[in-house]
Amino acid sequence: MSPTDGPVVRDGRVLRAQISKGRHGTLDGDVLAELREQLTKLAGQDPADPDGVGAVLLVGEGENFCTGGDVRAFAGAEDRYAYVHDLADTFHAFLEPLVNSPVPSVAAVRGWAAGAGMSIVCATDIAVAGRSTKVRPAYPGIGFSPDGGMTWTLPRLVGAARARRILLTDEVLDAETALEYGVVSTVVDDDEVLAEAERTAHRLAAGPTAALGRIRGLLTRTWDVGLVEQFAAEADGIATSAAGPEGAEGLAAFGDKRPPRFH
């Protein structure tokens, strides 16, 4: 299937989703619902399946990655509390399986990542930004508090003091600052963002899917457990990896002095 066939498509072992629409990059709720279904299915897939998904790639349709929800729709809603609460629930229902996915996620962050777009960037494993990329909370600008887990993810990325400053002052982060703070993972020329994100996603998808899933799980839980508990989880994870087919292939490739072929 070609990656241009629809907003959520398979490109080899990469699940590619266009999470915003239009030139300005408004968050596409319909795509989030579809992507949520696809992400939920990943929990039950066999990581050794060569036809399975090995990585998720998030892109925008236009010149911006995502500038958040439709503000005009917010303003025009008859019951704003119910309307916005429903949108936030839909957004969170997509983010939960993304964060808990057994496969890594990559974001191609061109142009602006604002509001919900910034929340998505903070929730992905690897965010590739362009030199002119800008990242902004944007919620205070319309009198809103954040959703999308930003008040949870951002302090863990940049530290509590910086997170307070960024959120309370609605600070705009340029690409180099976002890289320095750890909000994005790498910065490339603007016209290389999508290609670099695609290369990264396909490289991850060709890797040891089960082991990468264990790495993601260990990193996620590290904030909630002590070091001794993490020792135990790491010991179980590395032993499980060693006893599995990926470990067998990795060790055989090392002995044969060749690149491993995990899929």
Image (cartoon, rainbow, N blue to C red):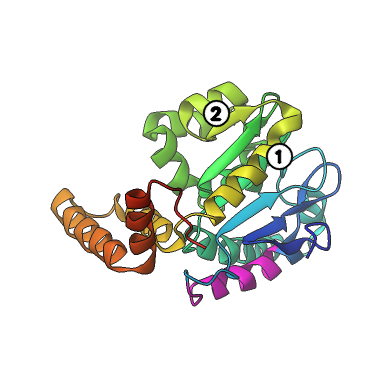
Q: Position of residue 237 (x, y in %)?
A: 27, 61
- Closer to us: mark 2 or mark 1? 1
The amino acid type, in three-letter code, at marker 2 is Ala
The secondary structure making up most of the magenta span is helix
Name the residue nearer the viewer: 105 or 203.
Answer: 203
Q: Residue at 73% of width from left, 51% of height from top?
A: 69
Q: Residue at 57% of width from left, 57% of height from top?
A: 55
Q: Residue furthest front?
A: 256
Q: Position of residue 26 (x, y in %)?
A: 78, 49
Q: Position of residue 117 (x, y in %)?
A: 65, 45
The residue segment tinted magenta is 32-46
The amino acid type, in three-letter code, at marker 1 is Ala
Residue 138 is one of the magenta-drawn residues: no
**Does any portion of residue 171 appear in the rendered image?**
yes
Q: Which residue is mark 2?
A: 178
Residue 36 is one of the magenta-drawn residues: yes
Q: Secondary structure at mark 1?
A: helix
Crowdedness of circle 2 by 10 Å Cα count: few (<14), some, many (20+)?
many
